[in-house]
Amino acid sequence: MARLDGPRPGSAARSTETRWVTVEFTGNSMSGLPWEFAPQQKSVRVHPGEVAEVYYQARNTAAETITGQAVRASHPGSAATHLRRLNASVSASSH
């Protein structure tokens, strides 16, 4: 999940109810890693401050179990201050 931060309560910032932000998602894995990793939706359009759920699908194409860690990256880097990962969970299934 990602959360886009809006103005703080009581601030003089303009209303976020009429503003929209489109957040685009990609999925990359380290070169040579036998994984398929991709977002289930390429983008989400939200009002600043609105919480949106975004799902990724990961598949291990190797014959053995591999443990990894997801790292969030935002581009441009200044966008990172407006995004917050609220929760990340993994649901495993056999391949």
Image (spheres, rainbow, N blue to C red):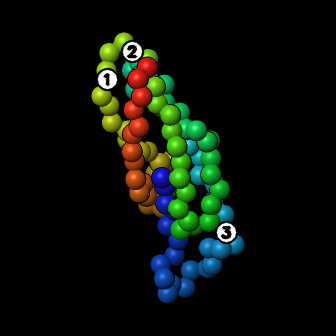
Please name the residue shown 59% across and 52% down the image: 23
Q: Quadrant of residue 86?
A: bottom left
Residue type, label 3? Arg
In percent of width and height, residue 94 lies at 41, 23
Q: Are marks 2 and 1 in contact (CB under 8 Å)?
A: yes
Residue type, label 1? Ile
Classify mark 1: helix, strand or loop. loop
Please name the residue shown 43% across and 20% down the image: 95
Left or right, 86 with respect to 38, comes to left
Residue 66, which numbered label? 1
**Circle 3 sits on which residue?**
19
CA gap between label 3 and label 2 equals: 44 Å
Residue type, label 2? Ala
Earlier in the chain: of badge 3 and badge 1, it is 3
CA gap between label 3 and label 1 equals: 42 Å
Q: Are marks 3 and 2 in contact (CB under 8 Å)?
A: no
CA gap between label 2 and label 1 equals: 8 Å
Q: Nearer the viewer, residue 70 or 57?
A: 57
